[in-house]
Image (spheres, grey):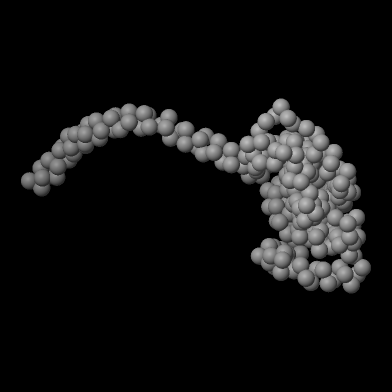
Amino acid sequence: MARASVAEPYRARPEKTGNTRESRETPGRCGSGGGRRGRPVARLRLPVLLVLVALVTVTPFVVMVLVAFAPPGGRTLPGALDLTRATWRNFADVLESADIVRWALNSLVYSLVSVLLILLFASMAGYAFAKKRFPGREVLFWSFLATLMVPFQATLIPYYLLISRLGGVDTYWGLIVPTLANSQAVFLMRQFITQLPDELFEAARIDGASEWRIYTSVVVPLTRPVLATLGVFVFLWHWNDFLWPLVIGQSERMRTLTVGLATLEGENVAVNQVMAGATITVVPCLLVFGLLQRYLTDSVATTGMKS
């Protein structure tokens, strides 16, 4: 009897399981059809959202260009939409009335020199923090990274007092040196170099390569994509920087483009000329992005690859 009582439920299980499968398949088929009908709508949500974000982002740039090419009477958007009256006169006027060439040269020196030095120091520090072993490495790295939580405005006055006592006001080195300790750049380089295989560095040391040779022949070529990406960001940060150049560049000859355009608004310059100057400032950014776009794609493609 005990065996029979155990066997009966055992026979009944397949029938119960089969019925459950049939009952599950019926609504599943109906649900799959509804899901397929709903998929095209769901797929359109992301493209529509991206198009809306792109329009919001591009609209101010388009308005700036339209007003820059509009005649003096077309200061507002409806008047600037008449492309048949487009003129280069605003660009000529702003180049004649302001020392914009000198300001552009200052911005170019400030941006390019800062990019080169920051990439050099950040790649060296990133290599040391990622592949070298020394006491206090983690404490030093995280302490340096903690400076990201300190806003630049809080250190502006100490920086200015120090640079002023060293005689760096109205000089290029006073403008550039305080921005070289970039903790974000060091963090990005360290995270990228950490993913590189240790076997490459060990093989180079076995071949008798010095640390400088390892840095120039192994680290720099392998980190070229992230260096290009970081270079674009650093260039944009410095090209669009306003507060620090405003404090250090106190004379007109040391103004950058951002500071110079801000002073034009206080000199009752026409809006069309201000927009023309702003359009000129965008051109170098577009050129840098266009030249380094291939490296930006390579950086995204190689993210997360350790070997």
Q: Is residue 243 above or below residue 45?
A: below
**Camera-nearest residue between 56 and 201:** 56
Q: Is residue 211 above or below residue 174?
A: above
**Residue 273 at x, y percent in the picture:** 78, 43
**Camera-nearest residue between 47 and 39:** 47
User: Which residue is farthest left?
Assistant: 1
Residue drawn at the location 22% of the way across and 31% of the way down: 22
Q: Is residue 67 above or below residue 262?
A: above
The answer to which quarter of the image holds residue 278 is top right
**Residue 183 at x, y percent in the picture:** 73, 59
The answer to which quarter of the image holds residue 16 is top left
**Camera-nearest residue between 267 and 119:** 267
Q: Is residue 47 above or below residue 266?
A: above
Q: Seen in the image, is 300 located left or right of residue 248?
A: left
**Residue 166 at x, y percent in the picture:** 91, 70
Q: Can you see residue 43?
A: yes
**Camera-nearest residue between 224 and 162:** 162
Residue drawn at the location 80% of the way across and 60% of the way down: 246
Q: Seen in the image, is 51 located left or right of residue 210?
A: left
User: Which residue is farthest front?
Assistant: 73
**Residue 227 at x, y percent in the picture:** 76, 46
Residue drawn at the location 38% of the way across and 32% of the way down: 38
The answer to which quarter of the image holds residue 96 is top right
The quarter in which the C terminus is drawn is: top right
- Tally the marks: 0
Q: Can you see residue 129?
A: no
